[in-house]
Image: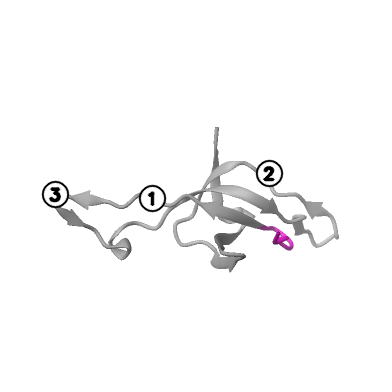
Amino acid sequence: MLKPLGDRVILEVQKEEEMKVGSLVLASNAKDKPTQGTVVAVGEGRTLDNGAKVAPSVKKGDKVIFDKYAGTNVKYEGQEYLVVRANDIMAIIE
């Protein structure tokens, strides 16, 4: 499995189902980019100037809402993931 460095978090993005309008099927680029996902791995945290670590406030398994244009898409062993910084995560879904 991938292990994120620093304050990065790896998310499994929830794909939205194909959208139909009447008898038309919208192309994937016509839909909004997904903004929800599940945390699959968390880095050690951000390092402060004094050397102390600040752990991310999310943990593996959390369902989260993240910034629409955040992160980098990564494909690993046939699965697609999104690597984001912890501050790009806006909320935990409870």
Q: Label 1: state its secondary structure.
A: loop
What is the three-letter code of the residue carrying label 2? Lys
| Residue picked out by circle 1 | 16
> Magenta segment, principal secondary structure?
loop
Task: Quickly name the residue at label 2.
Answer: 59
Mark 1 or mark 2, earlier in chain: 1
Instruction: Give percent across and percent down for residue 91.
Output: 54, 42
Q: CA distance from mark 3 to mark 2?
A: 41 Å
For the point 56% across and 64% down, the residue is: 78
Along the viewing direction, whichever of 51 and 58 lies nearer the viewer: 58
Based on the picture, tell me whether residue 14 belongs to the magenta stretch. no
What x and y, as percent, mark residue 15?
Answer: 43, 52
Q: Where is the C terminus found, in terms of image quarters?
A: top right
- Which label sits on residue 22? 3
As helix, strand or loop, the secondary structure at mark 2 comes to: loop
Q: Quadrant of residue 24?
A: bottom left
Three-letter residue code for mark 3: Gly
Other-residue count near label 1 (Cα within 10 Å), few / some / many at <14 / 14–19 / ≥20: few
Chain part drawn in magenta: 1-8
Q: What is the x, y in percent for residue 77?
A: 62, 65
Alpha carbons under labels 3 and 1: distance apart: 18 Å
